[in-house]
Amino acid sequence: MTYNHIDKQIIGELIRIAGERNVLLDPSRIETFSHDETSKEEYGHMPDVVVTPQSTTAVSEIVRLANRARIPVTPRGAGSGLSGGAIPVYGGIVLSLEKMNHVREIDYDNLTMTVETGIVTNEINNLVRDRGLFYAGYPMSLETCTLGGNIAENAGGGKAIKYGVTSRYILGLEFVTPAGEVVWLGGKLAKDVTGYDLVHLIVGSEGTLGIATAAIIKLIGLPAAKSDLLVLFRSPQEAISCVPVILSKGLIPTAIEFMDRRSVETSCAYLNENLPYAECGAMLLIEMDGRNPALVESEAEAVGDLCMERGAIEVYVADNRTTQERLWAIRRNVAEAFKVYCPIQSLEDIVVPPAAIPAVIPELDRISGQFGITIPCYGHAGDGNLHATLVKDPNMPMEDWHRIEPLSLAALYEAITKLGGKISGEHGIGLKRKDFMKKFMSPTELELLKTIKRAWDPNLIMNPGKIFDMED
Amino acid sequence: MHILVLIKQVPETDKVKMDPETGTMVRSGLESIINPLDLYAIEEALVLKEKLGARVTALSMGPPDAERALRESLSMGCDGAILLTDRAFAGSDTWATSRVLAEAVRRVGDVDLILAGERATDGDTGQVGPAVAAWLDLPVLTYVSSLEIEAAPLSDTTTADSVFLHKTTPAAIRVRRLTEEGYQVLEAAPPCLVTVVKEIASPRLPTLRGKKFARSEEIARWGASDLGLDPATTGLIGSPTRVTKIFYPKVARNGLRIVAADEAGIEKAIDHILALFEKKGILDKATVEDGASTPSSPFATSSALSSALERSPIAGGAPSPDTAAAPAKPEFWILAERRSSGLDIASFELLARARALADNRGALLAAVVLTSALSEKDAGALIAHGADRVVAIESPLLGNFICERWVEALANLVRARNPEVFLAAATTTGRTLMPYLAAKLGTGLTADCTELAIEEGTGLLLQTRPAIGGNIMATIKTARHKPQMATVRPHSMQPLSPDPERRGAVIRLSYESLTKKDTPRSPVQVLSMESNIKDFENLEGARIVVSGGRGLKKADNFKLIRELAHSLGAVVGASREAVDRGWISYSHQVGLSGKTISPEIYLGAGISGAIQHLAGIRTARTIISINTDPDAPIHAVADLAIVGDLFEILPRLTARLRQRSTGAAPHEPSILSSDTPAAAPHVAENRADTSKGA
């Protein structure tokens, strides 16, 4: 694709629309907008200008200008994405929603909240916690990510098995189309089949169809009690086989996290955690929550019993925050522990049918053996979404890694496709995985996606170069 | 063997509120947990049970809700639990609490070993353990980092049942006790009370099986009447100390913030750090002192003081306590402590504090020392630094700190002289001895005070201390009991400049004369002292502490901290996370479950500043933080906050410091004080003395 350059006149227009202090040109200030959490060296690209508008009107005018002048617009939240979705690969304008972070309304009668999408997701929960409410869209949220980013990627996280992913909690959107029109889609409605479900087409569209500037989100009752179980198994098969048994009893955990032996060992060694994991081939970390502590406790116990019946070595129970922190630290520090081993990694978020998880493990062993890399496997067992992470051998030369990384990724994606899986469950395709789309998505489906893109954004100004390339 | 574990249910420290009316903690609506240090006690008990066979009972005093903590202990593997709960117990101070616990231990009866965490994270006093031992007349071993039990052989009359429950009868208990100078190895005859530090064990997690057992197990509940205690003498009414004021310390220092994101930023950050060191007189000092020697030695070797003493007419005179009595004046006492290298600097700080208080009250200030023999020089130093009188209790038996033996001597002396105030530094000795003594004397004790004052009108001692992880300051009074006792946080005050012209009596007393015993028998023996241990630090004694945390990423990277510390003559500290991960040993840990310190300069790198950590450094004079996260809480309490990467900054800072010290070579041999800046006046003066004497 070719786009027009940004000239003085465009900058002048942007300043007129957004105000001088919301238009950033200084390279040292806009450098941070050139990358996200993916490797800066590998994927980073500088924008020409960063705009931080403070109103929907300003967003609309900026997009209208860009559409008219054929300048690419890359919307951006907190820049904590893991697929390169917010990187301005064609330069142009980065439209950061960081200053669009206001709460427009909290509607306690309808249990909804209308917020601008630049709000930090955690902040939403801080605002309603005292009222016993919470936003469950992305309960494992980091301190930094924004609602807009969550919407763009349809973020999932660890608690999807009970609470679902972001899309379940997005009832309506204030949306700026690539032509710069402003439209409200959806509403405070539990049901709505009035036409195509555009809201949920936009959720997960990675900012390629337009910019959501505000959202009506659903609030639910905050579960006051929770109880966590750390279950040690001899094998991944034993661990995973418990999952359908638990679910079929009507016990719905908030999270069922899986860690293979390598992840457990590395994380425990990193944390100096002395759990007796010598015989352990895999662990499940299971969380139950609810309003009634006694009920939560008894359900957790029922889950633990089921695991013991199915051959678990030991079940540890945590029902206060300190002990819970200790258990979750093992899961949360897997990535960090491997970063200490070698910081050069490719963090994946493959998703397979939950029952196929045990079959993934030997495939990972095969691939790591074949390419001389390490692939720990951990993630959300309840929904089949696994963070199989490709970790470079610390002694491997970088040029070898650059050659091997795409080959081993292709091998990984091929293996999970055969198992009925897909290449991304929650991080998105973005820049990082778009080359694999052609290979692992049917041409017909890919063409449908492109048709939609063309219909919405004929000038292809909106976050170009993401998910797929139109020229392909 | 029957092991009793004393546990306390505490609120999670980061969410504490106080009742401004009563000055007590609002416990409702908070998540409660077992005091983290008690978990180590539970774990150690369970390890002993597995190794030797024992019955383990958890004992706790608290509101009915404390049952949850006891159930948690059962689910970890304790065999039984007892809850001491009664409205009459509410508002108890450590004295009143320890009395109830001791009565309960008595009622349990057959106990071989009592274990407890060294202190609780909420009250942070560490007083209940030693005080319970005092009530029960048991030996107390505090700050224990490892424990071994020598089993007595089974007797012929052992029944099957007793084999099951009491497989082992302990013959001797050997412990390593963590002190400022290393590990004291002690042996005690059971029964005894042991308070443990984190190093002793890594607590296990509760299991599902354990939870089920815990739920089905009945927990005994004992109230005041069950223990034969008069409700009118327990709880708030029965407590010698009373909180009279609660206030919130200003935490944020609003220091200078530097973003070290690029080359220029990093240079600027390093320049500022160096400038701060310079201002504090650290740089000159580092070249002179050659590493982290304890600053107490200058006192011990001060020849100017010695010569002053030779001139002193009363030095060497040893009047008996009776003839030295000056009943008209109230007496203020401090406990002076001897270390292997001489008198502890904390004792001189304490003298400075007590001198001001005694002057205000018109009292006579005595420094009490228990030791094998006190040199004239040391006695003279105490007088020169503010004491009106030195009372030395001397005996070969007192060379090492053995709590019961020291208390035996001191209690009688206190009863005889009836001092109005008795202070000790909050050292491992002070924090063990004072609660034991206070329980014996039936008076109140306030732990780890940072401010002391005399109340106008009443003349009472106002004892102010941080509590609840430093979230609040509480002013406490002991209105109706004498002496008013307190331990004082080391380094919360500078010593006075020594005045060689000061005169004072030195009274030497023998241990035997005080205890009226010919052959004192103690169930505790000191076997050895392990000093010069690799990777051991005396954090409390340090003027400069350089700490590392999780941001270091791995153990190897602690070398960045060590190198910087070395070039500064600083001591190496660490956050809890770094210690938990096994990157560095426990003696380095700063914070609520480690050491609370007040150094001249604290530099924390790669430490986010969890509330527990900040509680440990709140009284540091100057705090420098280095962390990439601009929102790291440590930046808010820092005087100089560097938002930057420690891996960039530390090596260059160290290199600059080394450059300076080699660059300053012509200066080096002779900087014996003339240009040492004012930040360290006492040390400078003493160094001057040394040079004159030499």
Image: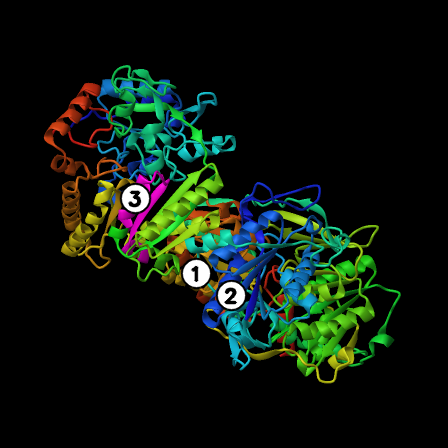
Asked whether the viewer can see residue B601, the reply is yes
Q: Give the distance between the C-alpha atoms of the residues marked 3 and 2, in whole angstroms.
A: 38 Å
In the picture of the structure, the residue carrying the numbered disc 3 is A245
> In this rendering, would A55 be left or right of A209?
right
Q: Position of residue B628 (x, y in %)?
A: 41, 47
* Quadrant of the image occupied by residue A271: bottom left
Nearer-the-camera pick, A387 or A174: A387
Query: From the viewer's perspective, is residue A321 above or below residue B313?
Result: above
Check the residue under mark 3 and report the chain it is in: A
**Mark 1–mark 3 contact, CB under 8 Å?**
no
Nearer-the-camera pick, B338 or B92: B92
Which circle, 1 or 3, is nearer the viewer?
3
Query: From the viewer's perspective, is residue B401 above or below residue A143?
Result: below
* Name of the residue lying farthest toward the right: B328
- What amino acid type should be assigned to the residue bearing mark 3? Val
**Mark 3–mark 2 contact, CB under 8 Å?**
no
In the picture of the structure, the residue carrying the numbered disc 2 is B45
In the picture of the structure, the residue carrying the numbered disc 1 is B561
Disc on res. B94: none
Q: Position of residue B374 (x, y in %)?
A: 70, 79
> In this rendering, would A444 be left or right of A279?
left
Q: Give the distance between the C-alpha atoms of the residues marked 1 and 3, in whole angstroms.
A: 51 Å
Q: Position of residue A31 (x, y in %)?
A: 32, 38
**Mark 2–mark 1 contact, CB under 8 Å?**
no
- Which stretch appears magenta? A239-265
Q: Residues within 10 Å of mark 2 (few under 14, many from 20)?
A: many
Q: Residues within 10 Å of mark 1 (few under 14, many from 20)?
A: many
